[in-house]
Image: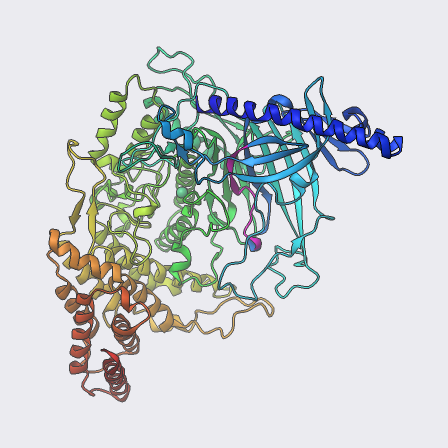
Amino acid sequence: MKTLSLFMLLVLFIIPQNHEAQNRRNKKKDNNSESVQKPAAKDKEKTIQELVKSSKEIDGLFKIYQDTIKGTIQMLISKDQIAKEFIYFSQIGNGVIDAGGFRGAYTGSKVFKIEKYFNNLEFITQNTSFYFNPNSPLSKSKEANISNGNMASIEIEAYDKEKGLYLIKADNLFLSETLSQIKRPSRPGESPTSFKLGSLDKSKTKINAIRNYDKNTDLAVEYVYSSPSVLNGGSNAVADGRNVSIQVYHSLIAMPENNYEPRFDDQRVGYFTTQVEDQTTTSSAPYRDLIHRWNLVKKNPEAPISEPVQPITWWIENSTPFEWRETIKDAVLQWNVAFEKAGFKNAMVVKVQPNDATWDAGDIRYNVLRWTSSPNPPFGGYGPSFVNPKTGEILGADVMLEFAHFTNRVLYDKVFELASIHKPFDNTDINNQSGKYCSLGEELHQELMFANAVASASGASDREVERIKKESMMALIMHEVGHTLGLNHNMKASQLYSPEQLNNADFIEGKCLTASVMDYAALNVTKDRSKQGQYDDVAVGPYDLWAIQLGYTAFKTEDERQALLNESTKPEHIFGNDADDMRSPGKAIDPRVNVSDQSNDQIKWAIDRIELSNNLMKETKSRFTKNGDSYQELRRVYYLLSGQKGSAANTISRFIGGVYVDRAVAGQEGATQPYTPVSLKDQKRAMAALSKYVFAPNAFDAPDDLYNYLAMQRRGFNFRTPEDPKIHNQVLSYQKNVLNHLLHYNTLQRISDSELYGNQYTLSSVMKDLNDAILKPDISGNVNSFRQNLQIEYTNNLIAILTGKQSDNYTNNAKSMALYNLNAIRAMAAPTGDIASRAHKQHLRTLIDNALKEVK
Ligand SMILES: [Zn+2]
């Protein structure tokens, strides 16, 4: 309706303008014929045929003519394409990570129209973010304060009146950043020495391929950015920092004409959405967010289970290692189990791209499972899809997999800085794709290396090692394919089983180890090695079945859909996504929604993981040193195990001040209140675990003779200096991560606030217990060097609450407790013990004395 009426409106506007333009042109022609020589006038009148006579014709949605000598292009637009909606989509064909672009990165889709303005054709991005009920008079003002985007205005070269065809030069449309932004803007605070692309060099930028089909016109363009001199030449992936190429695929796509019915989002299940706001409703939640899903239609609508008219077909790219193809196919087809619940048989089909295929993975008509082994891989897996922004219908998808994530290669320069692994993928330069980048590969890589280390230390067979690889690959592929079906993350899914169930090899055999493959769960590595069963998911989970049912079942009535949604309160349908997860300090509130964790008792699970790492640490030197090799492998395993302990500590810390969230709607069967604070018992248990495994004087003990061997393998001059292993720094970084959460202004504020609604672990008790954990065991005697480091750091954190840059964010209650603790430390830190301990305590007192002078 909306489209139709808008079209009519435009027709009314355009016709008079056309006449006007025509009249003007005629007038101009009359003038010209009086004053200008005849040949010039004739030039102006050139027909389309004359203008394209030295060009190759490439027919498709928009006919393209490419000059056979110069390579320049012209584009034909028919009258009935004017004012009609099309979809524009782009993806990176090839890039360098240095410049923020990489092969297979989707850069979003949008709706555009071509409008005629006098003698020009304009390419205008449409704003699709708002909905106006066409029956409301308000819909007459729907253009108010909303900007469309005029991307280009191109002069018409020739017009064929009879056939209704316009010819334009199309080089500027594709050879500059007209349709989408490619070069990343520089960010405030960016280091002046960081890698930067030069300016777009039009003389070098070129069209690599034109592929034209009935429903889409695709161009592969190589953009070259040049700069005469560069400070930073980039990584080894860049041959010449002064001239860098980024290949982009542009697709102009006909608006699908089918009976696809948009489906709206519900907070109880996790689909990717295109957000649309209803401007004509009085509702306090005026959302008509479109979920992303494929247009699956039953061949036989009456049958309870039918094949789809068109299945979702996946192609295994011909670059895929042979030995993994079967596992990949298995993983994709696991989703058919979910589709059967939604009424579809064989919804997913997997084929292998022939070696002599004439198409490549950049072709949007093919959904491809791709393999690359690229330098500095930005992910382990990535499953992007693109949609019709008007309806949410998924039009195409790929899955990108990186070989490095199935190796023991160290992928991060500072291995012990968990922050680098746990931060969400940097997607600030990519439009409309937030939440779509998946860092499961990174999480999984750590987990995979950990499982390998544990298995190899316990003398596992080659078959066992192969099993770990196969199961984790299945899990990764099911997860990425899940994204391409429209599902976003479910970081709460690991709540499904108890630690006992996960330790029962028979019980978990053949199952998904969590409620959903869309979690970033830790691998199941049992502390008691005799109980080891499956390591990772080999089937999709119960939440996945339910979510696919909600997205794809052809519901007869809305009541039917609501009834299925009301099953969200079943424990196996538990759901929480990235917005709720607690991986970063101070972010979110429900400790069950987290990454790199497992089981419905995360505290117990985390303690097990720490103890398992501690046990393994004792044997590391003998197990991971090989005669004839350098100590690189030993060093890697040392950092890996320490990192596991740090990550488990973070999981535990989130329970303190945590609040469980229930997404159920009012009146739903099985619903609890939206907010329920974590029990006093569990919060105390978390504090006791942190005290013992993170803060205690011996928490990070490693065999002394290990440190002498933590040497990196040398490689020419390409070597980090100074090369010391920096052990104190490393241990403090784990402790700091925990303190950053516990002393975050959001956490402390939540503890005070939640005392009003059921939290029994009061702010004063939390702060006192933390103070005791960090100081009491040794403050009256000798304090070892790790603990000195921790106590100074902690004291500085308390001071920062009172006088630091962020102090305005802290509540007065939190400030009072910080002051109280500082005074307590001041009283405890009498100069006793050995010289180093005395010096340390004097340092503490001086810090506190100076800080208290500043407190007003
Ligand atoms: Zn993901």
Q: Residue at x 71, y 20 (%)?
A: 161
Task: Estimate the x, y position of residue 269 in percent, counting from the top left.
Answer: 30, 35
State which quadrant residue 27 falls in: top right
Could you say which is closer to the camera, residue 474 or residue 61?
61
Could you say which is closer to the camera, residue 450 or residue 439?
439
Indicate the quadrant containing the N terminus: top left, top right, bottom left or bottom right: top left
**Left or right of 602 in this view: 160:** right
Q: Which residues are magenta?
A: 99-112
Using the rendered image of the protein, determine whether residue 350 is visible from the camera's viewpoint: yes
**Left or right of 358 in this view: 812:** left
Using the rendered image of the protein, determine whether residue 776 is visible from the camera's viewpoint: no
The stretch drawn in magenta includes residue 100: yes
The stretch drawn in magenta includes residue 745: no
Q: Residue at x 42, y 41 (%)?
A: 476
Name above or below for residue 18 compared with residue 762: above
Could you say which is closer to the camera, residue 146 or residue 425?
146
Task: Estimate the x, y position of residue 665 in percent, counting from the top left.
Answer: 20, 35
Name above or below for residue 599 compared with residue 240: above
Task: Estimate the x, y position of residue 540 in percent, counting from the top left.
Answer: 34, 33
**Left or right of 629 in this view: 142:** left
Indicate the quadrant containing the C terminus: top left, top right, bottom left or bottom right: bottom left
- State how many labels appear: 0
Task: Estimate the x, y position of residue 366 in percent, counting from the top left.
Answer: 55, 29
Name above or below for residue 74 compared with residue 422: above
State which quadrant residue 136 falls in: top left
Ligand 1 position by quadrant: top left
Scheme of colours in the image: rainbow
